Amino acid sequence: MCIPFAGILLCIAVMPLVAPAWWERHQPIVVGIWSLLFLIPFAVVNGAGASVQSALECLVDDYLTFIVLLFGLFCVAGNITLEGDLAGSPRVNVALLLFGTMLSSLVGTTGASMLMVRPLLKMNAWRKRRRHIMVFFIFLISNIGGCLTPIGDPPLLMGFSRGVPFFWSLRLVPMLLLNVAVLLFLFYHVDMRAYRRDIAEGRKPDISGPGTQVHIRGLHNVVFLLMIVAAVILSGTLPNLPAMQDAQGQVLGLPIFGEVRLTLPAVIEIAIILLAALLSFKTTSVEVRRSNHFTWGAIQEVAVLFIGIFITMKPALMLLQAHGAELGITTPFQMFWATGALSSFLDNTPTYLVFLTTACAQGFTSGVNTTLGVVPVQMLEAISCGAVFMGANTYIGNAPNFMVKSISDENGIRMPSFFGYMLWSLGFLVPVFLLDSLIFFL
């Protein structure tokens, strides 16, 4: 039953290379076929009701809030534009990547990615060699930068809702600083080489005026961005309030089918995010979106592909939940790589939760107290870093990865293929992660 999950990943990797036009037109059909190839055998083995419930669990419990959050951030960030004559040079690009990386822990990796991707694309529009800029953008802003707060990345929010203190993840500052320093050093030299080749070919940025002038349009949308951040925080805190629980301690919600319910905190989160997106569009001039070359293509592609990923990865997660404790993973080094490797291809939030549960079940008596048990500090650091950092290893490791790729493609940058991107991550990220594991997790 894991074959459909492998099949949909293979299609994402191969079809854009062998039949790009056909793939773009028929993505929904392919996703539907692979989803049915899981759901029908699952229904034969477990019954039609169980199959329907499995699909609805994926859609209601995971996919709905996931896609609404992406949609809200995509809309609000699309109504903010950075204009001026700042040209994309290696120093400017390093500064923007550093700023975006720090921003990720404040507004989330998705929020920072959607906020920074278009300005960076604009500033480097004059350059021919740009794909490496967006690859490192995914590495840093879409993933690694989100490790310092529960707002930064969903796995940390999951830990927060299980009793991990809100500011505990600030302990990951040394890991973040090491990774950012190494990757920005490598990026600067890669970008400088490409920059010099562009200049040698006669390419020049279109800069006019006596000095550098930069201004932001649609800045009021920061208020709506903060609304979305508040909604995410509420989604992690409201389920623990007695007012949101029934007499049995279950979170209040709307029954959908069988045991599937849309929880009241999720309804509140969705309502706030959609309101923020609506107000953003109502209060921002259409000229801002035109300046951003705003289209719906990126969010549509993510919505279609990830619904299939969420449904077909169900058996893989079930296997992991059933047998994760039997894998013999007992050290921080092992936890870092096991959590990271699976987070590269599965959703990193349930993967984080599985290994957090596995660690808490080992009977430790000192460390961080959670609702699942006690987990040693170094073990929790390894699980957190593995889930957040290694989401950068593939395009599907974290949702903003694919959105940044789609927006870059729309703006004329020929991004690496699925496997091509993995070569970049193997060449640049894996050595850095090896350094992390040797310094922090041995």
Image: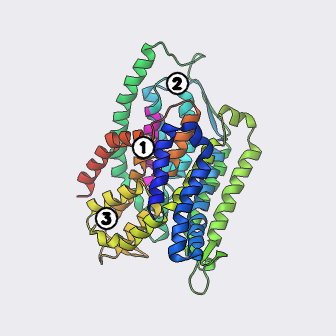
Residue 359 seen in the figure: no
Query: Which percent across, then down, holds residue 158?
Result: 48, 65
Of labels 1 and 2, earlier in sequence is 2
Q: Amino acid at mark 3?
A: Met
Residue occupying image coordinates x 27% and y 49%: 434
The residue carrying mark 2 is 87
> Nearest the camera: 125 or 208?
125
- In the rendered structure, the answer to whether residue 267 lies left or right of residue 108 reads right
Element type at mark 3:
helix
Residue 392 seen:
yes
Q: Residues within 10 Å of mark 1 (few under 14, many from 20)?
A: many
Where on the picture, by quarter, is residue 51? Answer: bottom right
| Circles 3 and 2: CB atoms closer than 8 Å | no
Using the image, tell me which numbered label, if any, was put on residue 139.
Answer: 1
Give amino acid for label 1.
Answer: Phe
Distance from the alpha carbon under mark 1 to that under mark 2: 22 Å
Question: Between disc 1 and disc 3, whose residue precedes?
Answer: 1
Considering the whole magenta stretch, tell me its main secondary structure. Answer: helix
Residue identified by numbered label 3: 379
Residue 419 vertical position relative to residue 166 in the rendered view, above or below: above
Q: Amino acid at mark 2?
A: Ala
User: Which residue appears at 42% of the width and 63% of the height?
Assistant: 351
**Closest to the observer: 274 or 148?**
274
Residue at (39% x, 73% y) in the render = 322
Q: What span is colored magenta in the figure?
A: 132-148
* Badge nearest the viewer, 1 or 3: 1
Label 2: how many Cα within 10 Å (few below 14, some 14–19, many 20+): many
